[in-house]
Image (spheres, rainbow, N blue to C red):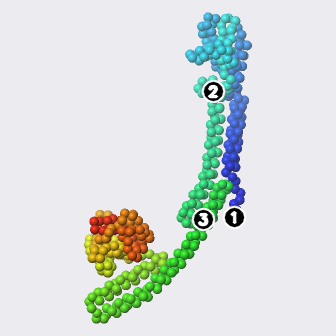
Amino acid sequence: MEKRQHSVSLSFILLRFGFTMLFCMLICCIIWYAGMIFLQNQGLVYPGHVGNQQVEHLIEKSPDKFIKPDDDFLAQYAIFDKNGNLIVSNVEGKMRNALLDKADRNSLDTLKHSYADGSYGVFLWHFRKEFSNPVLRASLPPFEYIWWTTLGIACVLCWLFNTLRLRKRLVAKIRLFSDVSEKVGEQKLDFQMPRAGIKEFDQALDAMEQMRQALYSSLSSQWAAQQQRDSEMSALAHDLKTPITIIGGNAELLLEDDIKDEHRKMVETILESNNRAKQYVSCLLEASRGEDESFESEDLKAFFDELCRNAKPVAEAGKINLVQKNNLSGNAKMQKHHLLRAVGNVVQNAVEHSPEGGTVTIESGMSESGWSITVSDSGAGFSKAAILHATERLWRGDSARAATGHNGLGLWFASQVVQNHGGELELSNSDKGGVVLMKFKG
């Protein structure tokens, strides 16, 4: 098998994914930092040290008394007289108390300054970037918080994009296995095994290629053998026509002679069975050529009468009483000869499993959903295993209904034909023996 080329390992793909992720995040960080510098240079954002510089500039400008700054002042402040009464502040409530608490603890971002007139002020600033526009500072969170959030969102989007991109690629490669499995399942084996381009995946596909070739070889051998069997079956069916024709011709000649009524009846039975055998051989030839009987509308009552006529010689040969109950009416589309053979198999099975002198009943009926045929015998009935498996091909495990020459094909063939007609075949037992019910939709 040809060696696959240009495959990379899954570890390399994952490592490349990691490096690509880091590179994208680095690009995001560079763009984020450049954007921040640009906003600072445009004067839209103050650097983090501006608050501290404004406080120092305010004190240097007026060391003897406090002069209220404009709205551009970033720091928080509270001014008290010499008796400790509040004069002015740009914070209120709990924020003012927190301001005093930080001043008492000598925090690095807090300054307590005494003026010449006996008053003193407490100033608090934050080492963070702020909007230069007072309206934005009042209505939005601090600029630095917003800017760090944008970096976090950008990194998350970068991770999400690269992950989805990797997922899309891996899913496309994994779908190759699904496509190959589907083709193998449908036995469409004449295809070239695809290449994933990933070392581990290609190794698995190589194993599937070996399986495909082995299965293709096996199915080719089976197909050749099947063709040989079909040819032999076709030749055998063709050869059967000669003795059947001879039997039918001799039976017709016997009927032309003056023979006893008892013998005449036997010859008529031979001729009728011979004609039925001709139909079976014709069906066998059609099957060997890949043809099939077409569905045609048939009179149900006439169909049942023909079925019973075919079953009568079988019952007489087995010394079985045949009871007929024809309750059918109307027409139905069917493969007549297939269905006659199928129900005939069921009747023959019932005759074989009934004791000499017993009774086999063939009863038909109509219902709202369709029509049915029931065949009951007076034998030992079906075993529990037979009720579950008797319609399976080549099943011969029913010791309760063992019979010489039983091939395990009669009920299987009947079940297949009934299903092809959209019906159901059910096995059960009555007080007198086994029951086979064949239900068909109208």
CA distance for labels 2 and 1: 64 Å
For label 3, the crowd category at 10 Å Cα-Cα, with few meaning under 14, some 14 to 19 and many 20 or more, is many
| Mark carried by residue 142 | 2
- The correct choice, above or below, for 94 with respect to 276 in the image is above
Image position of 359 (left or right of 401): left
| Mark carried by residue 212 | 3
User: Where is mark 1, residue-wise?
Assistant: 2
- Name the one closer to the observer, 266 or 369: 266
Q: Amino acid at mark 1?
A: Glu
CA distance for labels 1 and 3: 15 Å
- Residue 284 at x, y percent in the picture: 44, 79
Q: Quadrant of residue 384?
A: bottom left
- Residue 430 at x, y percent in the picture: 29, 65
Instruction: Tell whether label 3 touches label 1 (CB within 8 Å).
Output: no
Q: Amino acid at mark 2?
A: Pro
- Looking at the image, which residue is at 65% across and 13% down? 104
For the C terminus, which image quadrant? bottom left
Image position of 65 (left or right of 270): right
Residue 347 can be seen in this image: no
For label 2, the crowd category at 10 Å Cα-Cα, with few meaning under 14, some 14 to 19 and many 20 or more, is some
Q: Which residue occupies the extreme front position in the image?
A: 399
Instruction: Tell whether label 1 touches label 2 (CB within 8 Å).
Output: no
- Name the one closer to the observer, 59 or 342: 342
**Disc 2 or 1, which lies upstream in sequence?**
1
- Residue 161 at x, y percent in the picture: 63, 44
- Looking at the image, which residue is at 67% across and 51% down? 10
Q: Quadrant of residue 91?
A: top right
